[in-house]
Image (spheres, helix red, strand yellow):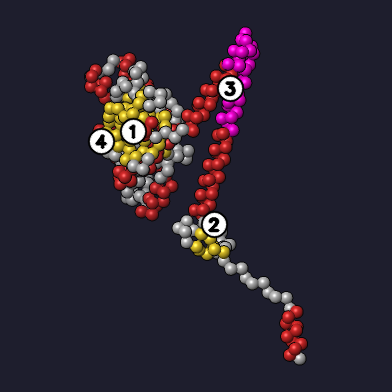
Amino acid sequence: MDFAKRWCKKLKPKEKPKPSPKKEVRSNGKEGLRVSSNEAPSNATKQKVEAAKQYIENHYKEQMKNLNERRERRNVLEKKLADSEVTEEEQNNLLKHLEKKETEYMRIQRHKMGADDFEPLTMIGKGAFGEVRICREKTSGNVYAMKKLKKSEMLRRGQVEHVKAERNLLAEVDSNCIVKLYCSFQDEEYLYLVMEYLPGGDMMTLLMRKDTLTEDEARFYVGETVLAIESIHKHNYIHRDIKPDNLLLDKFGHMKLSDFGLCKPLDCTNLQEKDFTAANNLSGALQSDGRPAIPKRTQQEQLLHWQRNRRMLAYSTVGTPDYIAPEVLLKKGYGMECDWFVSLV
């Protein structure tokens, strides 16, 4: 009987052993166990995946766009050459010249700019955590204004968001009324903004030199100031530091707005007049026009109101004391109207 039981056990299929965790070599050279997990990816991982996906899609979209533009430029040149009385040899030479220029342009685009590509010259300004110097590009010889910002000072003073907003505004707004940004890069210690150099000085120097502008001159510069402010307001940015020192003149005498270190992006699509209404006391007093006074908000209601409007209004008291608008000092929230105070006064 025992012999039969042992024989039956031999005939039963053997259970497969559970696979042991695989070993993998880590970056530090040590072996570790790789344990499989069915847990869902975290929100941070999802955000990184989405950002990588967006970056890759935008990269290849830009590549296809550039390729189509190159083909279009070549087709336009071929049509012009076909319509003109040009020999076949000259046509081939012009097409080869175009290809050479396109190749040089693509090579320049792939080149990563750095501080070594520029020769620093005279310092023209110094701020709390940076300086502005005139520099010359070594390859082309063109002269620019380079803004050099120290990272450690920016972090210590909490100015990271302001610098990001300045860079985004200069890259986004394409207007002849504001200073042009050519490129930006960084190293371990500094951030660099390479901008247009305006040799005409600023409006404050012009006012000190001339004392009083003529009516035509005043009308001209006020008009260009309005155009400059309007160009950034169209992209939902406020400057918050409009003053004569930040209005620069180019070599032709035209004025351009500069120094966007205090600018802030706003969402003005849902902004209403009631967002600027100041709260009054709880007594049953009447307002100047005879209407009942608006009840004062509780602390919780004020917090909810601020959270709802924090992207539509600005609350920080920033700017140069001599040029700060009254609504900035009231600390009740302000919008783009703060930029018009100096220009109207």
Which is more foreground, mark 3 or mark 2?
3
Would you place residue 266 above or below residue 223 in this image? below
Residue 168 relative to residue 64: left or right: left
What residue is pinned by disc 4?
321
Residue extending farthest to the bottom is: 1
The residue carrying pointer 3 sits among few (fewer than 14), some (14 to 19) or many (20 or more) residues within 10 Å by Cα, namely few
x and y, in percent, of residue 265 in the image: 41, 38
Q: Mark 1 or 2 closer to N-term?
A: 2
User: Residues in magenta?
Assistant: 64-93
Secondary structure beneath label 4: helix
Image quarter of residue 114 = top left
The residue carrying mark 1 is: 147
Badge 2 element: loop
Q: Residue at x 34, y 31 (%)?
A: 146
Identified by mark 2, the residue type is Pro
Q: Which amino acid, by three-letter code, is at mark 1?
A: Lys
Residue 106 coordinates in the image, percent (x, y): 51, 29
Q: Marks 3/2: CA distance?
A: 46 Å
Which of the two residues, 185 or 332, is positioned nearer the viewer here?
185
